[in-house]
Amino acid sequence: MQDEARRPAAVILGILEEAPHGVIFVERAAHLRSHGGQIGLPGGGMDPTDGGDLRTTALREMAEEVGVHPNRVRILATLPEIRARVNRYAVTPFVATIAPGELRIDATETVGVFTVPLATLLAEVREGVVTIGALEIDSTILDYGARRIWGLTGRILRTFVDAWSDPQDAMRTMIEERLRR
């Protein structure tokens, strides 16, 4: 069977430059047609105004969803594209550091924004099973407080943690240098 065309999308795994170097997550508004009520990374589908550039998509979405202007974002790495299982998106995750400043949600898309300390994320991402009604889904999971992060976002976190742990991958060194400033 031929793979149908996928819609390009991008997210930012944004790490705050201020200690404890939290990673930014959003909780999507429940009324949204796509992934309402779920927790994810700031991002979304490419828009015609993005000029075909996924970095532009990621930066636009970061500004729209959590009020982080692109001049505060330093993209340091690109993780491999991940194809969503439940929709036709092909998501490119960018890893970035975020300069100090406030986070401000767009209440039409986002009901909340929160951070998970980078050290917690690195230590506690795990493989597990998510139960929804009678359905059990194997997934990468991060439980933080009362929140469960899983699905596509869990898969991105696994890719990030694996890259962080790989001595051949320069991403960790670039991030640590930015966080020491």
Image (cartoon, grey):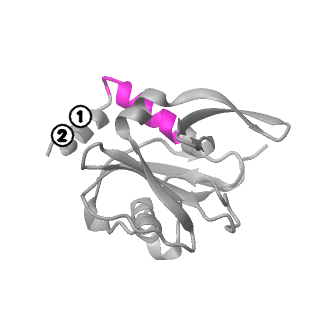
Residue occupying image coordinates x 59% and y 33%: 140
Question: Does residue 39 belong to the magenta stretch?
Answer: no
Identify whether 126 is placed above or below 91.
above
**In the rendered image, which residue does mark 1 sit on?**
173
**Label 1: which secondary element:** helix
Residue occupying image coordinates x 24% and y 59%: 100
Closest to the observer: 141 or 158? 141
Q: Does the rendering let one see residue 42?
A: no
Question: Does residue 159 belong to the magenta stretch?
Answer: yes
Closest to the observer: 39 or 90? 39
Closest to the observer: 2 or 136? 136
- Which residue type does callout 2 highlight? Glu
Q: Position of residue 3 (x, y in %)?
A: 71, 48
- Report the quarter where the N terminus lies: top right
Residue occupying image coordinates x 42% and y 63%: 62
**Label 2: which secondary element:** helix
Q: Does the rendering let one see residue 74?
A: yes
Magenta stretch, main secondary structure, is: helix
Instruction: Tell me if 77 is positioned left or right of 87 in this view.
Output: left
Residue occupying image coordinates x 71% and y 66%: 33
Task: Write down the region rendered in magenta.
Answer: 156-168
Q: Position of residue 166 (x, y in %)?
A: 36, 24
Instruction: Tell me if 130 is positioned left or right of 50 in this view.
Output: right
In terms of image quadrants, where is residue 169? top left
Q: Are marks 2 and 1 in contact (CB under 8 Å)?
A: yes
- Which residue type does callout 1 highlight? Thr
Residue furthest top in the image? 167
Using a 10 Å C-alpha cutoff, classify the residue at mark 1 as few (fewer than 14 neighbours), some (14 to 19) or many (20 or more): few
**In the rendered image, which residue does mark 2 sit on?**
177
Using a 10 Å C-alpha cutoff, classify the residue at mark 2 as few (fewer than 14 neighbours), some (14 to 19) or many (20 or more): few
Q: Position of residue 69 (x, y in %)?
A: 32, 69
